[in-house]
Amino acid sequence: METISKEMMKGNIDTILLALLKDKDLYGYELTKYVRFKTQNQYEMKEATLYLSLKRLEKKGLVTSYWGDEKGAGGRRKYYQLTKQGELEILRKKKEWTLMNNIMQLCFEGVDN
């Protein structure tokens, strides 16, 4: 499997999480599994990376959290959800990515594998 440099991924982790939280509210471990599922096992996010990013997104007001009311053996879970500001940010990021993709496609014209 091909890999992407850590530096390239580092700049996009927040965007990945915002995009996935657009689908539904998720708790931490569930979010790591969802990242793997949505990326077809091409990217596995470490828990430390996940929680640092979620904390940063919460501080920026793009994500909020709440405690679930689970009664099972696993204990209570902290769920994360997109705020209205987060929804606007992910739309902005999607436009930015579309533009960046177009630019890169133009630059890579004529480059063979």
Image (spheres, rainbow, N blue to C red):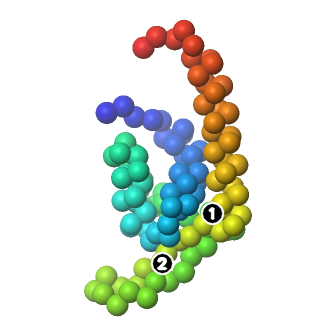
Q: Is residue 26 visible?
A: yes
Would residue 94 be found to the left or right of residue 7 on screen? right
Depth order, front residue of 69/44: 69
Distance CA(mark 1)–CA(mark 2): 15 Å
**Label placed on residue 57:** 1
Look at the picture and state if 15 lies above or below 104.
Answer: below
First in sequence: mark 1 vs mark 2? 1
Residue sitting at 40 percent across and 58 percent down? Answer: 34
Amino acid type indicated by mark 2: Lys
Would residue 67 be found to the left or right of residue 97 on screen? left
**Label placed on residue 78:** 2
- Category of crowding for the residue at label 2, using alpha-carbon neighbours closer than 10 angstroms: few (below 14), some (14–19), many (at least 20): some
Look at the picture and state if 17 lies above or below 73.
Answer: above
Query: Looking at the image, how many numbered discs can be counted on the residues?
Result: 2
- The quarter of the picture where the N terminus appears is top left
Residue sitting at 50 percent across and 57 percent down? Answer: 20
- The quarter of the picture where the C terminus appears is top left
Would residue 113 be found to the left or right of residue 101 on screen? left
Depth order, front residue of 98/44: 98
Would residue 1 be found to the left or right of residue 10 on screen? left
Residue sitting at 40 percent across and 34 percent down? Answer: 3
